[in-house]
Amino acid sequence: MESLAKKIYKVSHLRGKFKLRSGKNSNEYFDKYMFESQPEIMREIALKMSELIPKNTELLAGLEMGGVPLATAISLISNQDVLFVRKKAKEYGTCKIAEGKEFSGKRICIIEDVVTTGGQIIKSVRELRRQGAIVEDVICVIQREKKATVLLEQEGLRLKPLFYMDDLKDGTE
């Protein structure tokens, strides 16, 4: 049976001509939405990630955009309530940063798909904490760069990846 790491890499690793966010050109691209859009792979990921959730977690929080489908899938397996966290608060209606149950005073575990530096996680966590959330844990499918661990630790956050990018390239788990 093909390992989950191999499945993710096989569907998400693309070859061709791509312009990266940095502005550089590359003949390789990792398209995370390819694995997130396949129910069989997402089910396996959600099962494995549900095992990483700390026992004292009261709410899962999926970060816009890739963390939202993951948090939903994990919630269905773990039976834990979930928040959907925006990159910035809506400017209309409820004007909330996070949709879902009240989270002030609750222990939240952040769910993310791919973590490179952790910059967006830090911004989101600061806002959630400002509004009373207790956030100490982050779980992700893939950690691209090891420095994210250090940057998140400086914010009082523990990062637990399911895989490192090198694991996917090697096909190991």
Image (cartoon, rainbow, N blue to C red):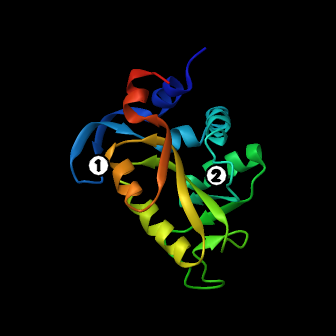
Q: Do the residues labelled 2 and 1 touch (CB within 8 Å)?
A: no
Say if 84 sits above or below 140 in the image: below
Q: State which tag comes first along the sequence, 2 or 1.
A: 1
Left or right: residue 143 versus residue 61 is left
Say if 167 sits above or below 36 in the image: above
Q: Mark 2 points at which residue?
A: 71
Left or right: residue 96 versus residue 161 is right
* Percent coordinates x, y for residue 4 in the rendering: 56, 26
Place residue 61 in its image quadrant: bottom right
Count of numbered marks: 2
Which residue lies most toward the right here? 79
**Tag 1: amino acid:** Leu
Q: Mark 1 points at which residue?
A: 20
Closer to the observer: label 2 or label 1?
A: 2
Disc 2 packing (10 Å; few <14; some 14–19; many ≥20)? many
Say if 100 sits above or below 116 in the image: below
How far apart marks 2 and 1 lie (CA) works out to 26 Å
Disc 1 packing (10 Å; few <14; some 14–19; many ≥20)? few
Which residue lies most toward the top here? 1
Q: What element carries label 1?
A: loop
Place residue 101 in its image quadrant: bottom right
Q: Nearer the viewer, residue 112 or 57?
A: 57
Residue name at image x 61 percent, y 14 percent: 1
Q: What element carries label 2?
A: helix
* Percent coordinates x, y for residue 94 in the rendering: 66, 83
Q: Which of 51 and 170 is in front in this view?
A: 51
* Percent coordinates x, y for residue 131 in the rendering: 58, 78
Residue name at image x 54 percent, y 72 percent: 129
